[in-house]
Image (cartoon, coloured by chain):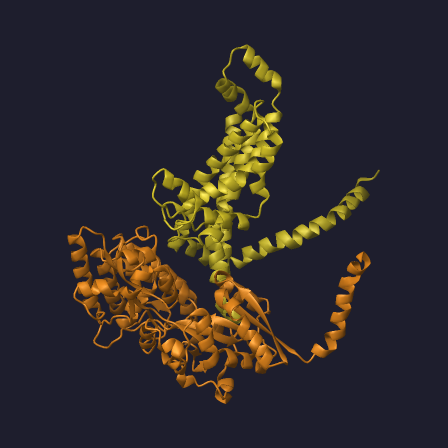
Chain colours: A orange, B yellow
């Protein structure tokens, strides 16, 4: 018995060697998935392998917090995977590195992928200098979650379509809460988030950068208008100006301390789980209000794409995987597993999505999303913006002064870009 | 025996170690120093035409970066609050373990030393649970005293103190052992003499223990300060430098600039500025120590 146990590893090794030659024809693809998706994709990958016996996919799961640096170091070390999921705001950076394979020739020849079926605003985030570098896998945008009952009490049957309407509703809600001696922050705009500020900026005309993206233009008229509107919510105490006051978003929402809040699709699941059952009928989602007469207001085209790396030696097989994962059927199943919203409009006709009342606002919103500036430094810039949101929220700096200083910081970040733009002339 | 062959033999024996130090220490440091005068970044990584030597521009830029000043302030906060606290806790536990009244000394010595040898990442994850605003043990304990839930790692005012407490807990065991060794080196007859003269416990501590521990204390303070200036893993695991950069240390800033934004030249310059700060601190400490001796 003991002897058998001792030679077992040897037997297994021999068995492994003897199956070796048979497996030689199998193409091995490396797929990197991040966070929850990296785990949830596994059953889909197994099915893909059943459909393509000649392809084996090795999935590596990487936490979101380490994903960016892992990809950069993999690129520097020449060990990028074949296929990987990539937040669409990261695509500009990896195209600057020349790390991604343009996908136009694959997409053009594909029988199942119809690019015009994808939400146009989201698709545009994958196109850089008119070449396609990614195929949207799931989409994400930001809408308003709100308490229907409280807005009704304030006299609003429908969610206000404009920001001036939202300000009026906030005033009414705050007044009636004060009459009941209750604390209310009608519109919660966290000071550690850049999304509301940037969405407002896009609605007031964008123009975040000037000189071909070589200088900050946040102190320009467009963003000043947006930031002034944002600061109004803090000045009138419609939103708390620090993070300490709201320790649990869901409790505050069900207590009516918060009435409106801008957030993403993952919160459909969280709200369904965390808001008490008797209050489930009281919350709803709505597309962003607008700064002009066009509704809904513009929001952000976020989401995750599937990309192929230039270094991949199995591009045909890699494309098959991308095609499979981004297909309408797979994306509907993936929605069922994760709640991630499909990028193909035809997928939304599926009953699971069509019957979700909370998803409808996302569908409307996704028709009106505009791309963000496609420069590698963008993420670094918006993360710095949070500090200035806080400065304005707490009243430490006035809007013009805050934006002037922020532009100074942005110009330091963009120094290299400025040099490149000047040298290109 | 001739000196030259002996020296040659010594060099031959030393050469493996010197080679390792040269390749894995001296060379990278020199390379990083050279890098700090370039603008090696994401553009240069993609295309070498975008690589420039920029002289002292990175160093100038550091002082123009508001986040650097935030990080510097946070790091000093950590060193000046955490350093003395850590030394005091180490000395306190060492004194208790050294006391003749203490029982199960070996057991406690092991227990107190355990955090030092545990993996920091694992420990930080457990502390994150302890600090959890809704389900954490710490807030549960505080709720009995009627203190409302504190968002330890999410509130800008308490995030750094929370990190300090955890770091002190993690590190005090090492210094405690050094203090214990120092205490054991103090001859017993000094205490006996003091006892006969009627000195109280506190007087004995001030006039015998502290002066006799001086070399140990100097060593401990220096090592602690050098180590604490390099605060990184605790905020990296527990807060990612947040909330609102209130736990961003200089090393965390360097890491973020280097590996998150890939501004390698800039990050290298930050590394050498930190080196200069630590060097200055250590020199000041040594000078102070010398002037006290005289």
Give the residue at x 52% y 18%: B204
Q: In the rendering, at what x and y percent does residue B119 appear?
A: 57, 48
Q: Observer-nearest residue: A342 or B83?
A: A342
Residue B31 appears in which quarter of the rendering?
Answer: bottom right
Q: In the rendering, at what x and y percent does residue B29 appear?
A: 58, 53
From this view, report whether residue A123 is shown above or below residue B85. Answer: below
From this view, report whether residue A400 is shown above or below residue B165. Answer: below
Say whether residue A267 is visible. Answer: yes
Figure quadrant of the C terminus of chain A:
bottom left
Residue A248 appears in which quarter of the rendering?
Answer: bottom left
| Left or right for B153, reference B50 | left
| Left or right for A289, reference B90 | left
| Left or right for B171, reference A395 | right
Q: In the rendering, at what x and y percent does residue A105 appear?
A: 51, 86
Give the residue at x 17% y 52%: A180
From this view, report whether residue A9 is shown above or below residue B16. Answer: below
Figure quadrant of the N terminus of chain A:
bottom right
Q: In the rendering, at what x and y percent does residue B254 appear?
A: 48, 55
Give the residue at x 38% y 48%: B151
Q: Observer-nearest residue: A353 or A300?
A: A353
Residue at the extreme right: B1
């Amino acid at each position: 018995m003991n002897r058998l146990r001792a030679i077992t590893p040897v037997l297994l090794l021999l068995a492994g060697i003897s199956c070796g030659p048979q497996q030689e024809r199998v193409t091995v693809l490396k797929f990197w998935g991040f966070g929850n998706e990296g785990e949830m994709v596994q059953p889909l990958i197994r099915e893909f392998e059943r459909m393509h016996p000649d392809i084996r996919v090795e999935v590596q799961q990487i936490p979101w917090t380490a994903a960016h640096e892992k990809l950069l170091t993999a690129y520097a070390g020449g060990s990028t995977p074949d296929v990987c999921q990539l937040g669409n705001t990261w695509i500009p950076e990896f195209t600057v590195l020349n790390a991604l394979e343009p996908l136009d020739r694959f997409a053009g020849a594909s029988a199942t992928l119809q690019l015009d079926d994808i939400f146009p605003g989201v698709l545009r985030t994958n196109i850089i200098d008119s070449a396609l570098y990614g195929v949207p896998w799931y989409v994400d945008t930001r809408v308003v979650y709100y308490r229907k009952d409280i807005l009704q009490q304030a006299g609003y049957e429908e969610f206000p379509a404009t920001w001036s309407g939202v300000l009026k509703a906030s005033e009414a809600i705050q007044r009636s809460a004060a009459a009941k001696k209750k604390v209310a922050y009608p519109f919660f705009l966290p000071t550690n988030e850049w999304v509301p500020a940037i969405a407002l900026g896009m609605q007031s005309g964008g123009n975040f950068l000037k000189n071909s993206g070589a200088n900050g233009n946040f102190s320009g008229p467009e963003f000043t208008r947006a930031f002034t509107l944002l600061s109004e919510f803090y000045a009138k105490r419609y939103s708390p100006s620090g993070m300490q006051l709201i320790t649990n978003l869901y409790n505050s929402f069900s207590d009516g301390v918060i009435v409106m809040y801008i957030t993403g699709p993952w919160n459909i699941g969280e709200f369904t789980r965390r808001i008490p059952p008797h209050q489930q009928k009281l919350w709803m989602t709505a597309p962003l209000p607008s700064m002009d007469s066009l509704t809904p207001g513009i929001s952000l085209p976020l989401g995750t794409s599937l990309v192929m790396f230039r270094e991949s030696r199995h591009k045909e097989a890699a494309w098959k995987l991308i095609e499979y994962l981004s297909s309408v059927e797979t994306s509907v199943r993936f929605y069922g597993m994760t709640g991630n919203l499909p990028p193909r409009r035809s997928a939304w006709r599926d009953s699971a999505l069509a019957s979700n009342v909370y998803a409808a606002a996302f569908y409307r919103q996704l028709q009106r999303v505009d791309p963000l500036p496609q420069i590698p430094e963008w993420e670094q810039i918006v993360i710095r913006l949070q500090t200035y949101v806080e400065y304005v929220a707490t009243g430490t700096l006035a809007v013009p002064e805050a934006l002037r200083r922020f532009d100074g910081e942005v110009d330091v970040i963009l120094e290299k870009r400025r040099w490149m733009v000047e040298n290109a002339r | 025996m001739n000196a030259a062959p002996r020296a040659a033999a010594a060099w031959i024996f030393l050469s493996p170690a010197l080679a390792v130090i040269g390749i894995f220490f001296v060379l990278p440091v020199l390379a990083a120093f050279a890098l700090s005068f370039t603008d090696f970044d994401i553009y240069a990584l993609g295309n070498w035409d975008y690589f420039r030597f920029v002289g002292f521009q990175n160093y100038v830029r550091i002082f123009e970066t508001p986040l650097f000043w935030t990080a510097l302030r946070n790091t000093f906060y950590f060193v000046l609050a955490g350093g003395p606290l850590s030394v005091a806790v180490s000395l306190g536990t060492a004194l208790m373990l050294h006391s003749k009244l203490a029982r199960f000394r070996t057991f406690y010595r092991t227990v107190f030393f355990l955090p030092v040898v545990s993996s920091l990442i694992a420990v930080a994850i457990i502390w994150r649970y302890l600090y959890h605003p809704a389900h954490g043990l710490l807030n549960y304990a505080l709720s009995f005293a009627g203190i409302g839930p504190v968002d330890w790692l999410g509130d800008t005012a308490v995030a750094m103190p929370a990190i300090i407490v955890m770091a002190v807990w993690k590190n005090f065991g090492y210094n405690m052992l050094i203090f214990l060794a120092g205490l054991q080196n103090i001859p017993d007859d000094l205490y006996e003499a003091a006892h006969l003269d009627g000195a109280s416990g506190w007087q004995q501590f001030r006039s015998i223990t502290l002066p006799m521990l001086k070399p140990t204390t100097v060593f401990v303070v220096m090592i602690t300060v050098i180590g604490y200036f390099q605060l990184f893993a605790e905020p990296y695991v527990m807060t990612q430098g947040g909330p609102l950069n209130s736990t961003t240390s200089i090393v965390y800033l360097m890491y973020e600039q280097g590996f998150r934004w890939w501004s390698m030249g800039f990050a290298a310059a930050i590394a050498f500025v930190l080196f200069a700060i630590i060097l200055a601190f250590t020199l000041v400490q040594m000078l102070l120590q010398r002037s006290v001796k005289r």
